[in-house]
Image (cartoon, rainbow, N blue to C red):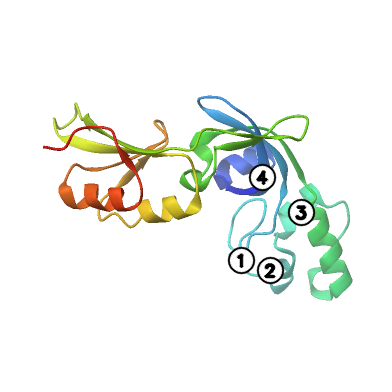
Amino acid sequence: MNQIFVISTRIARAMNVPYNINGVITKESDKAVYVKGNGIIPKDGRCARCGRKLTHPGSKLLGIGPECLGSWVTRDVILETLTEDQVKTIRDEVEAVKVDQWIPKSIIKNFAEIDFSKKVVEDGKTVVKEVFKKVSLVRSAKDDMNYLKIEFSFDRETLQNVKTLPIRKYSPENKAWYAPANTKILDMLKGFGFDILFSIN
């Protein structure tokens, strides 16, 4: 299943990969995912390679700045005289840049939106993990307070529901959301179909 990965622009430049990637996860470790895919042109007017805001009209059409263009496209480009066919050809070349490597989870800026429940294995088959939605009660050593630990197999509807909680925070390290342990939030989670893994007094 293809997904969009948005990674740190600074690290993307160092790795010489696009900072917006359309790809699939083929392997996963505790700290990284192996992604196979290709670059895509960002829709926010930024350079596909370095993430800087584009200002030249020609660069905006291409989706990549003139300096970065030389890293991925083997041709001289005069931005002021680009034809529609040239723009399409160059954009296709930029989006053909391959990504086939491990990417640290810590640099994936949209980590909370990535579906880790499905991976495409080497033979092209999709492996589906267990589907679950659960809430447990944990105590923080930092402030000695109780919190709700919210875990679920990824789906966009559940993610959007969790984001409606008045107070919540995502932990990439634990792959879980945390929220204050109060009745209002607990009732909302029950309404979203979560299993409550502790007794309520």
Q: Which residue is mark 4?
A: 1
Q: Which residue is mark 1?
A: 45
| Badge 1 or badge 4: first in the primary sequence | 4
**Is 191 placed left or right of 106 in the picture?**
left
Pointer 1 with pointer 2, Cβ within 8 A: yes
Labels 2, 4: front one: 4
The numbered mark at residue 60 is 2
Q: Amino acid at mark 4?
A: Met
Residue 85 % position (x, y): 88, 70
Label 2's element? helix
Q: Which of the 4 image quadrants contains residue 92?
A: bottom right
Pointer 1 with pointer 4, Cβ within 8 A: no
Residue 143 in view: yes
Report, in whole angstroms, how far the alpha carbon at label 2 lies from the one at label 4. Answer: 29 Å
| Badge 1 or badge 2: first in the primary sequence | 1
| Badge 2 or badge 4: first in the primary sequence | 4
Report, in whole angstroms, how far the alpha carbon at label 1 lies from the one at label 2. Answer: 6 Å
167 above or below 106? below
Q: Amino acid at mark 2?
A: Lys
Q: Which residue is mark 3?
A: 95
